[in-house]
Amino acid sequence: MKADDRMTAGVFFRNLLFGIRVVIRTTCGHKMADPGNLYIIATPIGNMSDITYRALDTIRKVSLLLVEDTRVTNKLLAHYGIQVTMESLHDFNESGKITRLIQYLRAGKDIGLVSDAGTPLINDPGYRLVCAVRGEGLAVRPVPGPSAIIAALSVSGLPADRFVFEGFLPRKVAEREAFLQALQYEPRSMVFFEVPHRVLEAIESCIRVFGGERPAALLRELTKIHEQHLAGRLEQIAQVLNQPTQAIKGECVLVIHGSTLPEYSESIEKARQLLLDLKERISHKDAVELVARHTGIGRNKLYSLGLGTRLKNQQ
């Protein structure tokens, strides 16, 4: 074979190999894209101005925006003049959409996830999707911003270095107070969400379990025009809410000081002795109420420890 022929053959095979590489990296004439990202995007909890530039930029760029309620998110998008393809994602349809959404990401398309307010997944849908996406080795990226929990803690006047978030309390009284009983000796600040029409009932349950003297803060309509802060002892907050002129509207965040009592301490014995000392002067019910108020030990706890029963038996 002549030198020119060998050179021609070499060029031919190099071009052939290049073509094979192109075919391998090509699907339907397009270069195979890198997988897309799932962005978890925090949005305002009330004030439309409380959103980051990055959040707005990410919402504009994603191929699909998953939202908790299209009506709520439409207000935010309209405020900032953003048009993007939206799709609802909530507790009732999340599981059924996961496979298709993962295929969407594998096709190289970015997806954004927002809730109605604040940081997604915090008492909102999205957990199952995030777990599935991470399980497939695909990227989940945070776009941080507003959070009602952090906002409430920052202005509550209660310890914020260590806290526990417990979501919404159970609706039924017995279940709610059993739930709170398990937190009787929780040393960290406790944060709860509550709806307006149940917030007074929730605080009354907290008084029965934790005692009326426990410091707390109730924060309503955070960052909105009618933002309201009530801080003090639980019994003081309940008194304010019980006023006829006090209208309770808007979502509420309740922050309660953690317990300063170890589960088994001298305080228990002091409470027992105080109950016994009071037995000659006031009723059983009033004695338990008084001890609960001044020791921080909830009435239910006094009964569960046998303190109230012991007093009753000795009357």
Image (tube, rainbow, N blue to C red):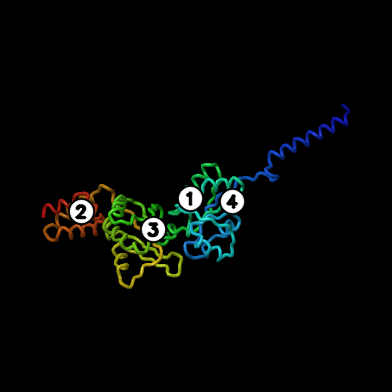
Viewer-nearest residue: 144 or 24: 24
Q: Nearer the viewer, mark 1 or mark 2?
A: 1
Q: In x, y percent, where is residue 216?
A: 34, 60
Q: Residue at x 70, y 45 (%)?
A: 29
Quarter occupied by the N terminus: top right
Q: Which comes sooner in the sequence, label 4 or label 1?
A: 1
Q: Which dot marks residue 136?
A: none
| Label 2: few (<14), some (14–19) or many (≥20) C-alpha neighbours in 10 Å | many
State the CA–CA distance, disc 3 to disc 1: 23 Å
The local secondary structure at tag 2 comes to helix
Mark 3: few/some/many CA within 10 Å (<14, 14-19, 20+): many
State how far apart marks 3 and 4 are (Cα). Answer: 32 Å
Sooner in the amino-acid sequence: mark 3 or mark 1: 1
Residue underneath mark 2 = 271
Instruction: Provide the residue designation for mark 4.
Output: 110
| Mark linked to residue 94 | 1
What whole-number distance in Å separates the C-alpha atoms at marks 4 and 1? 18 Å
Q: Secondary structure at mark 4?
A: loop
Residue at x 56%, y 65% (from the top left corner): 78
Residue shown at 55% from the left, 63% from the top? 77
The residue tagged with tag 3: helix, strand or loop? strand
Q: Could you tell me if the residues under marks 2 and 4 are in contact, i.e. CB atoms within 8 Å?
A: no
Q: Are marks 3 and 1 in contact (CB under 8 Å)?
A: no
Q: Earlier in the sequence, mark 1 or mark 2?
A: 1
- Residue 32: x and y in percent read 66, 44
Q: Amino acid at mark 2?
A: Ala
Would you identify the image quadrant in which residue 193 lies?
Answer: bottom left
Label 1: how many residues lie within 10 Å, few (<14), some (14-19) or many (20+)? some
Q: Which residue is mark 3?
A: 193
